[in-house]
Image (cartoon, rainbow, N blue to C red):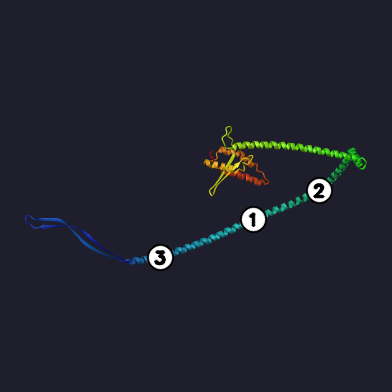
Amino acid sequence: MSYSRHYSRRISGRAHYSVSYGASDSGGTIDGYAPWSEDVDIDISVDTSSFDHGVAKLKNHIDGLTGAVVATEAAQIEEKIRSANSIGQSLTTGFFSLISSEITQQIAALKSKVDSLFLKLNDMKSACEHIQHNMQQDYHRITDRYTSVFEELDRELAMRIASLDKAAYTLKRDSASQSQRSYDSTLSTVPTVFFSENSHAQGVLSAGKLRSNMNDLLQSATAYLASEKQISKAVSSMLMIGDWKDTTAVSLPVAYLAVRDSHAPMVEKIILSPTPGSLVDDHDLKNNILARFRKQNRGWKPMISEDRVQIERFLIPKVDAIQTSAQDHDARVRQTILQLWTTFTPEMLSL
């Protein structure tokens, strides 16, 4: 594309000059420098029509070359795709044909093997049926022989037992006839008086036995009440508040549990050992103990290894002793408890 440019500049400089003057006295020449300046205007016109024509012609050639390259690349890609599809189809067909032929050969080999095994199994079945038939015949024959032997032994034993116990049977028949005769004869008052005295004696013996049992029960109850009263007095003396000169320090075992959760307030619980009296249900006592634990303001710390080992001495036997009707459920419960104990280490108050 043709274009024009205009440039305007001022140029300046110093020019050397030499002036000669006439001889007045002796004459001579004077040298010097004079400054000068000049405004210069330049217009430049550039004609690019021939260059533009050449560029347009070159662009046409490049566009044609680009189209040819794109067409060639598309044809090459299409040919590659077609070749890849053809190769893939051939590979797939060959693979499935190979697998099909392999499976067919294996099926034929296995079928022949199964047929031979089936014939062998039929032969074994026939042999087993024949053995079963022989065993049944032998069993019935042996059963009949031993049944007759045992029946003969039973009859022989019955006859021998009857001969050995003949005297006892005779005595039983005679005693039964005598007892029946006593009821039927005029001496029927004798057994009546005997039974009356016998029943009275049995009543006296039963009353004596009952009195002895009641005696033992009263003595056991007295001993239990005395021991309970003694323990209650001891516990009351331990819990009594006041200054006593003869008092001694007594400890009451108490378990304090606290569960902390980020989404819920702390849950506290007091566990007392089984004690006589109403200490277990004493809410004031539990509240007093909770207040004492809160008042101490002690910090929680992880459980040390010695305390953990001491607790495991009692915890593991308790877990192993879990026994219900479902053994699989017991195993899962034991595993879960031990896993929780191993994973989550409880904290304890620094006493």
Q: Residue furthest left?
A: 25
Expressed as whole percent of the image width and height from the top left, the position of residue 255 reads 58, 41
Considering the numbered disc 2 on the image, is that residue within a helix, a strand or a loop? Answer: helix
Mark closer to the chain start, 3 or 2: 3
- Position of 50 with respect to 30 (left or right) is right
| Residue kind at label 1, given as amino acid type | Ile
The residue pinned by badge 3 equals 61
* Helix, strand or loop under label 3: helix
Residue corresponding to mark 2? 136
Q: Which residue is mark 1?
A: 103
Which quadrant of the rendered structure holds the N terminus?
Answer: bottom left
Residue 42: which quarter of the image?
A: bottom left
Circle 3 Cα neighbour tier, 10 Å, few/some/many (<14 / 14–19 / ≥20): few
Identify the residue at horizontal 47%, vertical 62% (top origin).
Answer: 73
Circle 1: is it few (<14), some (14-19), or many (20+) Cα within 10 Å?
Answer: few
Q: Is residue 161 visible?
A: no
